[in-house]
Amino acid sequence: MANTPHDPERSEAAQTLADLEAVLARIHGLSQLAADLRAIRALVLDGRPPRVAAVGRRGSGKSSLANALLGAKVLDVGAVDDTTREPQWLDLERNQRKVRWIDTPGLRAGGNPERSERVAALLAKDPPDVLLFCVRATQVDAGIDDDIDDLKTILTAIEGRGAAKPPVVAVVTRVDELAPPLPKQPPFGDEKRGNIDKAVEVLKRHFERKAITVAATVPVGAFAKYFSDGSIAIDWRYNVDSLASAVFDALPQLAQTEAAMAFETSRALRRRVARRIITGATSIAFFIGAAPLPHDLVVLTPLQGVMVMGVSFLSERASRARMVAEWTAGMGLNVGAGVALRAAARSLIKLVPGFGGAISGAVAAGGTWALGLAAIKYFIDGATIDETRAEFEKVKQAGLPKDFFKGSASEKPSDTLIETPGSVAPAPAHHDEDPETKPEPDGER
Ligand SMILES: Nc1nc2c(ncn2[C@@H]2O[C@H](COP(=O)(O)OP(=O)(O)O)[C@@H](O)[C@H]2O)c(=O)[nH]1
Ligand SMILES: [Mg+2]
């Protein structure tokens, strides 16, 4: 993703993460947290654009889907897809975020027998993360076997060249064209919605019959008109947020952050990425707090700083710099929040001898969690700084969710962390039992 070379904030985040990693690596019992830090780094800094391949007949609405997903006119629609044109990878851009996109009107199109081999070779060389198999709603029963065979040929070719078979998201396109003709614009009436459900069922049955596994089957309307600057003028899009989320789910995690930023209807997706960041940071904070460190603050403060910066990168608003300034002033600096929390923890330790480690871990984690949720509210949900402060206080009072270490703090269990080669399972798995229990230091053996 935007590992933009000359972005000082990103360099700072990268440096801070590297420092944290170096510190944790030296602390007895905490070296396993390095994997969690790498996961945060991947979400915040190391992402890459998603690669999406759309397959479907000419006029099935592939180009319109790209525009609908990005919420801007990035491809020409209704262009007579010249079937002799070689498909090629394109960089679609919105808000400086990229989606790598390729579409092909099918292997048979143009009746060129070598075409099939060339398309397959192209996709196998630069394999897509996800294949969008586009079928017009009015054609889910028309000649579908040939289309599914095409899809199979592509998948087999990609696999045959040693790449992993990409997941397939089936898209039932142009759903507004199903009966009855009116209304053309969403929300449709019950009758049309019933027919949309039927079209989806029909397509699903064809997949079953042809033994094709698809990650999701999503009905979509992509009709929109754009101003000459590319922004949306008439917006009759239907269910595009579900498509965005199905594509997001099908992507490898390294490509998810960029997708969440590039897709227009994606606040929920950005929130999910942010929750992974704060879940990871909170988990690390717990173990830092629980470890008998003389100077946890030194580690906790930059950790919270990186977390908040990571969430702020997910902000859609152009005025991010001003927001960061307002956040810093309004929250009394994330440093300040860290300091206050740790001071509170210390006084607790004095009061309750014997539970020191566990309580300070819970406090460190609770404070990090509260700060992270506040950052989401401010940078992603667009709350005012006053509302944000109130949220911070409220969550801090409430403490960590009871089931945090059971993995439900993130929206989905799989949301917690990234698999990096040789790394450990999701952070909460460090610690499956009661969060009040002090974790065993490793390396005693
Ligand atoms: N009514 C309607 N028309 C659509 C929709 N999506 C695409 N179209 C129209 O279908 C035609 C072909 O769309 P396009 O995106 O170029 O299809 P492609 O050939 O697969 O790239 C264009 O005239 C689009 O305006 C839709 O959801 N509803
Ligand atoms: Mg097209």
Image (cartoon, rainbow, N blue to C red):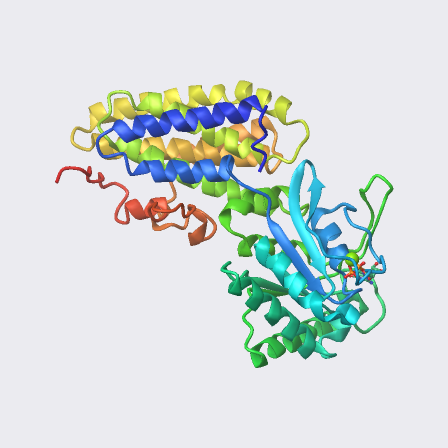
Q: Nearer the viewer, residue 337 or 77?
A: 77
Image quadrant holding the C terminus, namely top left
Q: Residue at x 67, y 62 (%)?
A: 118
Q: Where residue 238 sits: x, y (%)?
A: 73, 58
The quarter of the picture showing ligand 1: bottom right
Q: Residue at x 60, y 46 (%)?
A: 259
Image quadrant holding the N terminus, namely top right
Q: Where residue 45 sits: x, y (%)?
A: 51, 34
Q: Residue furthest left?
A: 445
Relative height, residue 110 to residue 100 (above, below): below
Q: Is residue 416 left or right of residue 179?
A: left
Q: Where residue 385 sits: x, y (%)?
A: 58, 27
Q: Residue furthest right?
A: 228
Residue 298 found in image quarter: top left
Task: Please count the marks in the image.
Answer: 0
Relative height, residue 70 to residue 186 (above, below): above
Q: Nearer the viewer, residue 362 or 288?
A: 288
The answer, for residue 107, to whether it is visible in the render is: no
Q: Is residue 74 left or right of residue 433?
A: right
Q: Residue at x 54, y 24 (%)?
A: 9
Q: Nearer the viewer, residue 113 or 305?
A: 113
Q: Where residue 62 sits: x, y (%)?
A: 74, 59
Q: Residue furthest bottom?
A: 209
Residue 127 found in image quarter: bottom right
Residue 207 found in image quarter: bottom right
Relative height, residue 325 to residue 179 (above, below): above
Q: Is residue 159 left or right of residue 405?
A: right
Q: Residue at x 67, y 27 (%)?
A: 319
The answer, for residue 93, to whether it is visible in the render is: yes
